[in-house]
Image (tube, rainbow, N blue to C red):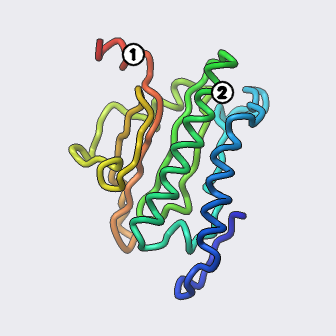
């Protein structure tokens, strides 16, 4: 269940059960019916938000944050494998917002240009690595890129990370 918890003082209850549910959600992407480009309408993408309560996703514990992030990446990898099997012309990525993980999602892009706008040509937070900071396992052939998107009215730094498939142009450039 996805729920915003406005009382940040309360400790989340049932953490093991909620993490099991999160892992079940990630595994479900193996057989999830793919949305078609027509389902996406003019937006060119379809997304699945992190299905946990806000107090769990935004928990200060690095271990819990790591488990939430790894479930997102596993869900995206399962979705990417399914799109390859279906030979769908699309890209899969995790869009991660730090420090507020509650806004993170798995996104299926049917529009290459829209994916490129998230993927970017620069890596503003290099040489930092989300995988190294949280001990994450990124699928082979995937990249991670981070950007500082802090606005003056925000109370602290905000980062957007994209963990997703390489674009063909980047694959040929690396060869």
* Residue at 44% in and 22% down: 167
Rendered image quadrant of residue 15: bottom right
Left or right, residue 175 beside residue 42:
left
N-terminal-most mark, 2 or 1: 2
* Residue at 60% in and 24% down: 90
Q: In x, y percent, where is residue 84?
A: 61, 20
Residue 169 vertical position relative to residue 165 in the rendered view, above or below: above
Query: Marks 2 and 1: CB-CB under 8 Å?
Result: no
Tag 1 residue: 169
* Residue situated in front as seen by the camera: 47 or 129: 129
Disc 2 to disc 1, C-alpha distance: 22 Å
Rendered image quadrant of residue 7: bottom right
Tag 2 residue: 82
Q: In x, y percent, where is residue 132?
A: 30, 49
* Residue at 38% in and 61% down: 158
Near mark 1 (Cα within 10 A), the count class, few <14, some 14-19 or many ≥20, is few
Residue 85 vertical position relative to residue 1 in the rendered view, above or below: above
SS at badge 2: helix
* Residue situated in front as seen by the camera: 77 or 161: 77
Kindly identify which numbered label has been placed on residue 24.
none
Near mark 2 (Cα within 10 A), the count class, few <14, some 14-19 or many ≥20, is some
Residue 168 vertical position relative to residue 17 in the rendered view, above or below: above
Q: In x, y percent, where is residue 48?
A: 66, 47
Left or right, residue 175 beside residue 25:
left
Label 2 or label 1, whichever lies nearer to me, is 2
SS at badge 1: helix
Left or right, residue 18 beside residue 60:
right
* Residue at 63% in and 57% down: 22
Q: In x, y percent, where is residue 14?
A: 64, 75
* Residue situated in front as seen by the camera: 146 or 73: 73
């Amino acid at each position: 269940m996805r729920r915003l918890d406005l009382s940040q003082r309360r400790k989340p209850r049932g953490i093991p059960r909620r993490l099991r549910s999160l892992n079940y959600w990630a595994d479900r992407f193996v057989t999830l019916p793919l949305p078609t480009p027509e389902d996406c309408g003019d937006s060119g993408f379809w997304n699945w938000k992190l299905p946990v309560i806000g107090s769990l996703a935004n928990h200060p514990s690095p271990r819990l944050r790591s488990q939430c992030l790894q479930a997102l990446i596993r869900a995206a990898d399962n979705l990417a494998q399914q799109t390859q099997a279906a030979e769908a012309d699309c890209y899969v990525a995790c869009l991660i917002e730090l420090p507020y993980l509650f806004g993170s999602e798995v996104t299926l892009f049917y529009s290459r240009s829209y994916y490129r706008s998230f993927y970017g040509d620069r890596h503003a937070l290099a040489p930092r690595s989300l995988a190294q900071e949280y001990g994450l396992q990124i699928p082979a052939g995937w990249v991670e890129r981070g950007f500082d998107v802090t606005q003056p009215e925000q109370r602290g730094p905000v980062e957007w990370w994209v963990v997703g498939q390489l674009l063909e142009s980047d694959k040929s450039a690396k060869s």
